[in-house]
């Protein structure tokens, strides 16, 4: 069914059907394989088939190479991480990449990684010692303060006591401060006091104190002071609030308990001597070491930055090379190894027009790799369905993506994209019609288009990315909107008599009946678009609604007819006459005898000015076709014409349903009557390679399935004719919504603000008007009309002819998107 | 009368547009056919819309009744 090529009916048109594709087989000697794949990747016109799909990733030929590339990619990611932490940006590379060799890169990356890791480790160690020394310094300062203040108060007390001593003998001299242990009078109570100094995190300080107290049964004395600024903790590297503590204890057991508790709380301890002289010495020593360490650390960081700079120079180059190599090895894994193990066989889809370029690339690769034998290029014949490939440029690619979003075209079926390029912006504009708004959108999209080059290299946000990608579609939308805005005569909802004066005027000079019976038509019809008098009148809505509804029906019937005609072109192309006689013709007859007739009635009513009620005519055409029409008669012999059309419509329904399955069955039998044996493989093989996926032999033919399929298709078409025609009324609905919103914003915001004669209120009114126009009308209405126009195309237009069950051509290429980091 | 004249104007504009497109972007027969199709489709769409709005106003069944606050 699929292989029959047509195309003789009409001259070929770009973009109408997929490019002709062929299945090619390439036989490449081992030594030129890598280079061949690289050149084919540069060409970007071959989609390789995976010939090793049964093998797991580890069983494939080039698994080791991929692992290598994966390692290098990991190192590159690590560098990128380090560079972003240090704030170094990779520079744009100006060198050509073919000059660098993968092995060199691998070695270089390994060296740089080792060096960077070492520098980082050293840096961390130095930083840690630095933080410890800073803490030590704080301890020395604060603890020193304790002791010196305690010493002062002790000496003060001692002097006091001594001065009292003369008066009071035998005072308890155990009141002397603890520090002066050599002054302990009672030798039997001589205890060895020790002390520990350190830092404890502030949150834990109370708990710390309490636990120490309990553990040593209250036999300790602890003093804590707060450190005002947060200190960098050496182990975690972050700032923390800490307190300096001094713990006085007696006995070895108490000491060990205290040490364990300190460890548990993460309190760092530092040695401290009571001697004032030694304290001063320690402080100067520590300060000296701190400044030394600082210079060392700075030097280390400077060295690292230089290293990162050198990496940054070559980063993009290496990154691209590694990704390219990885892609090449993935592709090489898809090729199958020939039995003799001397060459690789590749199968892939490529467009017919690219044959010469591919053969060229193969030759160049063979020459460049100094191989003895050249590669072989062969076209295979197969019954598989090829991928679909449309050659689009930046203008047509956006529309093609929109069409593909619904379904990729089957190979060589008619592409709705051709007409969608024009009809989609047109239907959008019918729903959007306001030439003021159209100009605003035109300015916005002209900005995007004029800054195309600059914006395409930048990384934009998601929404901007979509708007930028669709800039040409939006351009078309805005141009058509300006046109329909001129026709609807709306400039931010204000009409202007641009082309001629209005056709309506008062009945008499006093204009007394203008608000009751209305004006009359005195001049010729307003030549281009809607008469400007209508805006703001009482009878505006009845008139406009009638006009826009009828216009929607006329446009809808035209587009649906176009869809059915596209199915005729498909049937001609695939040489399926059963589709022409028993699908296209009954469908045309059915649709046009009902809704085509309605369109004709609309036009006749407008041309003659008759007062016939078209609802009545259409409904009674079905309910009582033989009745007299009376005042609903639009043309002579209308009753007869209606009877004939009704008859044709009724007859066409079984024509759509019954003949096709029987004819298909007869065709199938005729095809397979003389073939009781399955035919031999048609594919030509010179090597022991199987073409995968060749479904040869006869297909299954289930008559009941075909019949049910045809039944569904018929019902869908018949019911769809009514519902799809009604669906086009959304053109009316959205255009009404747009004009009403626009007129509300104008009258209730701008005119209201103008009426107050106050500058501030006017400015406020203008701001509100601008925000409302941009937010509601330019953004929301645009999206809404876009969506509905899209729906009309995807459903009402495409279900007349489009199958859309193909798959897209995805060639092997090296153009990586920015976020393709594996 | 006005209808025929303006229809002719649309026809002429369509022909001129196709010629312009053929002159400035002449890129092979299949591409030219595509451009021609697009221009013709656009012309027909625009003409249809104008024609519908024009014919609807030639013999009106409803006349404008001004609102009272004029």
Image: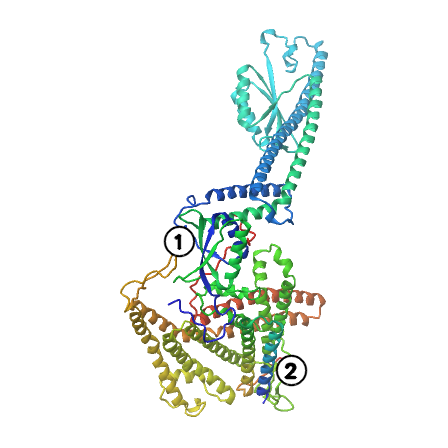
Give the residue pinned by disc 2.
A499
Of A169 and A157, the residue lying toward us: A157
User: Can residue A657 be seen?
Assistant: yes
Of A686 and A236, the residue lying toward us: A686
What secondary structure is marked by label 2? loop
Tell which residue pokes out farthest to the front in this image. Answer: A372
Per the model, the C-alpha gap separating discs 1 and 2 is 76 Å
* Earlier sequence position, callout 1 versus callout 2: 2
Q: Which of the 4 quarters of the picture holds residue A271?
A: top right
Looking at the image, is A53 positioned above or below residue B68? above
Residue at 41 percent across and 71 percent down: it is A574
Q: Which of the 4 quarters of the picture holds residue A527?
A: bottom right
Label 2: few (<14), some or many (≥20) within 10 Å?
few
Is A575 on the left or on the right of A363, as rendered? Answer: left
Q: Are marks 1 and 2 in contact (CB under 8 Å)?
A: no
Give the residue pinned by disc 1.
A687
Is A309 on the left or on the right of A599, as rendered? Answer: right
Q: Position of residue B25 (x, y in %)?
A: 61, 71
């Amino acid at each position: 069914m699929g292989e029959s090529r047509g195309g003789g009916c009409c001259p070929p048109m770009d973009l109408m059907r997929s490019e002709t594709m062929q299945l090619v087989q390439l036989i490449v000697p081992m030594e030129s394989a890598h280079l061949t794949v690289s050149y084919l990747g540069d060409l970007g016109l071959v989609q390789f088939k995976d010939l090793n799909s049964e093998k797991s990733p580890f069983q494939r030929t080039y698994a080791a190479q991929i692992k290598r590339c994966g390692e290098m990619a990991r190192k590159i990611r690590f560098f990128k991480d380090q560079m972003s932490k240090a704030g170094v940006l990779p520079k744009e590379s100006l060198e050509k990449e073919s000059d660098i060799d993968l092995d060199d890169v691998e070695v270089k990356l390994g060296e740089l990684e080792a060096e960077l890791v070492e520098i980082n480790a050293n840096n961390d160690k130095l930083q840690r010692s630095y933080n410890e020394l800073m803490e030590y310094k704080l301890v020395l300062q604060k603890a020193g303060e304790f002791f010196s203040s305690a010493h002062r108060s002790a000496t003060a007390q001692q002097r006091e006591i001594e001065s009292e001593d003369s008066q009071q003998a035998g005072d308890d001299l155990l009141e002397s401060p603890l520090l002066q242990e050599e002054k302990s009078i009672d030798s039997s109570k001589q205890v060895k006091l020790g002390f520990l100094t350190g830092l404890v995190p502030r949150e834990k300080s109370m708990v710390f104190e309490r636990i120490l107290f309990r553990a040593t049964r209250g036999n300790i004395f602890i003093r804590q002071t707060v450190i005002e600024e947060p200190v960098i903790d050496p182990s975690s590297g972050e700032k923390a609030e800490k307190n300096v503590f001094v713990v006085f204890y007696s006995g070895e057991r108490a000491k060990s308990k205290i040490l364990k508790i300190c460890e548990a709380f993460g309190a760092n301890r530092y040695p401290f001597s009571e001697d004032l002289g030694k304290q001063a010495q320690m402080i100067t020593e520590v300060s000296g070491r701190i400044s030394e360490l600082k210079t060392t650390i700075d030097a280390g960081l400077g060295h690292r930055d230089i290293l990162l700079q050198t990496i940054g120079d070559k980063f993009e180059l290496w990154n691209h090379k590694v990704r390219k190599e990885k892609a090449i090895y993935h592709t090489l894994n898809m090729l199958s190894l020939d039995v003799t193990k001397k060459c690789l066989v590749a199968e892939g889809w490529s467009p017919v027009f690219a044959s010469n370029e591919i053969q060229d690339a193969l030759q160049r690769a063979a020459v460049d790799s100094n191989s003895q034998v050249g590669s072989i290029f062969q076209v295979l014949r197969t019954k598989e369905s090829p991928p679909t490939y449309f050659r689009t440029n930046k203008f047509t690619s956006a529309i093609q993506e929109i069409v593909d979003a619904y379904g990729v075209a089957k190979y060589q079926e008619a592409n709705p994209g051709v007409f969608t390029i024009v009809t989609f912006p047109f239907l959008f504009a019918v729903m959007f019609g306001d030439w003021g708004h159209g100009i605003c959108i035109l300015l916005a999209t002209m900005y995007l288009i004029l800054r195309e080059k600059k914006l395409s290299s930048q990384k934009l946000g998601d929404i901007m990315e979509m708007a930028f990608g669709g800039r040409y579609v939006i351009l078309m939308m805005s141009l058509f909107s300006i046109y329909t805005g001129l026709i609807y005569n709306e400039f931010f909802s204000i009409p202007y008599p641009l082309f001629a004066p209005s056709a309506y005027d008062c009945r008499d000079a006093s204009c007394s009946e203008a608000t009751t019976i209305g004006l009359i038509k005195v001049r010729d019809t307003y030549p281009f678009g809607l008469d400007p008098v209508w805006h703001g009148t009482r009878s505006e809505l009845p008139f406009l609604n009638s006009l826009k509804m009828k216009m929607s029906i006329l446009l809808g019937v035209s587009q649906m007819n176009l869809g059915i005609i596209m199915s005729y072109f498909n049937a001609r192309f695939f040489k399926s006459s059963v589709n022409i006689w028993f699908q296209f013709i009954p469908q045309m007859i059915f649709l046009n005898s009902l809704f085509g007739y309605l369109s004709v009635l609309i036009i006749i009513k407008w041309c003659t000015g008759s007062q016939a009620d078209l609802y009545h005519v259409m409904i009674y055409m079905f309910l009582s076709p033989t009745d007299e029409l009376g005042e609903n008669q639009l043309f002579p012999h209308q009753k007869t014409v209606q009877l004939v059309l009704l008859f044709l419509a009724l007859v066409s329904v079984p024509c759509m349903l019954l003949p096709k399955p029987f004819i298909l069955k007869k065709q199938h039998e005729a095809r397979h009557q003389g073939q009781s044996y399955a035919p031999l493989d048609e594919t030509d093989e010179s090597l022991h390679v199987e073409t995968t996926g060749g479904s040869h032999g006869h297909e299954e033919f289930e008559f009941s399935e075909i019949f049910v399929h045809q039944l569904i298709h018929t019902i869908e078409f018949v019911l769809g004719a009514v519902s799809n025609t009604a669906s086009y009324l959304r053109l009316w609905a959205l255009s009404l919504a747009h004009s009403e919103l626009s007129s509300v914003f104008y009258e209730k915001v701008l005119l209201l603000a103008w009426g107050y004669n106050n500058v501030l209120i006017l400015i406020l009114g203008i701001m509100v008007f601008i925000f409302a126009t941009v937010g509601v009308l330019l953004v929301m209405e645009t999206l809404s009309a876009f969506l509905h126009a899209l729906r009309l195309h995807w459903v009402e237009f495409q279900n007349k002819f489009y199958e859309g069950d193909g798959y897209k051509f995805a060639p092997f290429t090296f153009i990586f998107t920015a976020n393709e980091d594996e | 009368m006005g209808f025929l004249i303006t229809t002719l104007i649309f026809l002429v504009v369509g022909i001129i547009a196709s010629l312009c497109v053929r002159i400035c972007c002449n890129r092979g027969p299949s591409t030219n056919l595509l451009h021609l199709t697009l221009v013709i489709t656009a012309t027909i769409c625009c003409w249809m819309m104008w024609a519908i709005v024009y014919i609807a106003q030639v013999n009106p069944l409803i006349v404008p009744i001004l609102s009272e606050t004029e």
